[in-house]
């Protein structure tokens, strides 16, 4: 029996990376492999724990078929290692931090995909964005407007007829983790098997060969 691809989406600032890190142990207990993405940015860049590569390296990897999925967003290229297909075939579940704009393509490739939209109240998001001090007021307002649009999609049915599950992250991380576990339990993603985690560092070794 093949595993389930869990496709977590949400606007910037919604806390996807924080949720994934906080939920790491219970996710692994449910046989969910957490995928680190490949991104065209400096390894020193602040943000998620991803494999940073140059645009030239990314294109080489894409041409070699190293990615199961890849997309462009905010001027960067994002790739999901092709090894997830082997893991899914072995019955292991896989969680990816995905792009909402790429969801239709992802569902075409993985019909049993479970889409989850992480939402956050605008007042909470404004406080978080102001607190980290990275963006201008104008940038923050643009993020808030995009978050409002994302929030309207929770529970909606996408182009392929799949309901997008909504998960609120306006409160504490522990509440969001419990909400995620409850959602996965309701979807039958609750098997306790071998603990696994997919690390794209192996791609570096493939590049060196």
Image: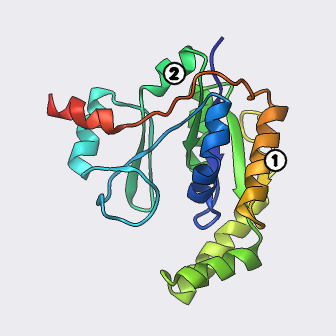
Q: Mark 2 and 1 residues: CB-CB less than 8 Å, in contact?
A: no
| Residue bearing mark 2 | 87
Colouring convention used in this rendered image of the protein: rainbow
Q: Please rate how many residues cluster around mark 1, counting C-alpha atoms within 10 Å: few if below 14, some from 14 to 19, many from 20.
A: few
Residue 153 in view, yes or no: no
Helix, strand or loop at label 1? It is loop
Residue nearest the observer in this picture, 188 or 85 = 188
Q: Is residue 105 left or right of residue 71?
A: right
Helix, strand or loop at label 2? It is helix
Residue nearest the observer in this picture, 47 or 151 = 47
Residue nearest the observer in this picture, 184 or 25 = 25
Residue 106 in view, yes or no: yes
Q: Quadrant of residue 153?
A: bottom right
| Residue bearing mark 1 | 156
Q: Which mark is residue 171?
A: none
Q: Please rate how many residues cluster around mark 2, counting C-alpha atoms within 10 Å: few if below 14, some from 14 to 19, many from 20.
A: many
Q: Is residue 103 above or below residue 135?
A: above
Marks 2 and 1 sit apart, C-alpha to C-alpha, by: 29 Å
User: Nearer the N terminus, badge 2 or badge 1?
Assistant: 2
Q: For the view shown, which residue lies furthest in the left direction?
A: 209
Q: Is residue 175 left or right of residue 43?
A: right
Q: Residue at x 56, y 88 (%)?
A: 137
Residue 193 drawn at (x, y percent): 64, 21
């Amino acid at each position: 029996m093949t595993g389930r691809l869990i496709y977590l989406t949400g606007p910037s600032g919604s806390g996807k990376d924080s949720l994934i890190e906080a939920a790491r142990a219970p996710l692994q207990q449910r046989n969910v492999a957490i995928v680190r993405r490949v991104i065209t940015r400096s390894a020193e860049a602040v943000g998620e724990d991803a494999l940073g590569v140059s645009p030239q390296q990314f294109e080489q990897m894409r041409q070699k078929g190293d990615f199961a999925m890849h997309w462009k967003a905010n001027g960067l290229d994002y790739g999901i290692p092709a090894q997830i297909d082997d893991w899914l075939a072995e019955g292991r579940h896989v969680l990816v931090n995905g792009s909402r704009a790429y969801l239709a393509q992802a569902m075409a490739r993985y019909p049993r995909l479970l889409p989850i939209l992480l939402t956050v109240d605008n007042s909470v998001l404004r406080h978080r964005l102001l607190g980290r001090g990275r963006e201008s007021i104008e940038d923050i307002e643009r993020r808030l407007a995009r978050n409002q649009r994302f929030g309207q999609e929770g529970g909606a049915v996408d182009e392929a007829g799949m309901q997008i599950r909504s998960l609120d992250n306006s409160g504490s991380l522990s509440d969001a983790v419990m909400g995620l576990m409850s959602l996965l339990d309701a979807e039958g993603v609750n098997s306790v098997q071998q603990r696994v985690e997919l690390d794209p560092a192996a791609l570096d070794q493939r590049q060196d060969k």
